[in-house]
Image (tube, rainbow, N blue to C red):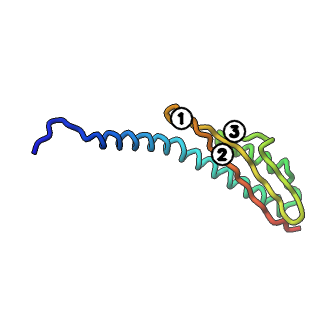
Amino acid sequence: MKRSGKINFGCIIMSILLAIGGLAAYQIIPLRVRAAEVNETVKRAAETAATDQRYKDENIRAAILETARNNKLPITEKQIRIERGGQVIHVDVHYQVTIDILGYKYDMKFDPYYDAPRFD
């Protein structure tokens, strides 16, 4: 049986949905990778501060801000919180990035943190 140029409506809808999903993935995946680099920097900085008394809060902030700048993430000094209490150094960062997918704006929130046990 021949079909002369007729296209299934479901096929068109599925193609549109796949295109939108691909566009979203194209924007979200690189952002997640860059955010993972900040997570790793938070962890490394907290561990270094826990084992080296000369590694001050300013060093932790500088490392995180440099990674954020290199990855074009909107992190400021005010968004970095460092607490040295008892036997733990707690470092956390709160920031968000707005992505635009075909006019729909979505705020992705990131909250990397790390608690490093101190070895004095």
Looking at the image, the residue that sits furthest to the top is 103
What distance separates the C-alpha of mark 2 from that of mark 3? 11 Å
What distance separates the C-alpha of mark 2 from that of mark 1? 16 Å
Q: Which mark is residue 104?
A: 1
Answer yes or no: do the residues labelled 2 and 3 have beta carbons within 8 Å? no
**What percent of the width, then of the height, locates residue 35?**
64, 48
Q: Which label's residue is closer to the chain start, 2 or 3? A: 3
Total count of labels: 3
Residue 28, picture quadrant: top right
Identify the residue at image location x=73%, y=54%. 42
Name the residue carrying label 2: 109
**What percent of the width, then of the height, locates residue 55?**
85, 55
Q: Amino acid at mark 3?
A: Pro
Identify the residue at image location x=86%, y=52%. 56
Name the residue carrying label 3: 74
Front of the two marks 2 and 3: 2
Residue 12, picture quadrant: top left
Q: Residues within 10 Å of mark 2 (few under 14, many from 20)?
A: few
Q: Quadrant of the C terminus?
A: bottom right
Q: Quadrant of the N terminus?
A: top left
Q: Nearer the viewer, residue 59 or 73?
A: 73
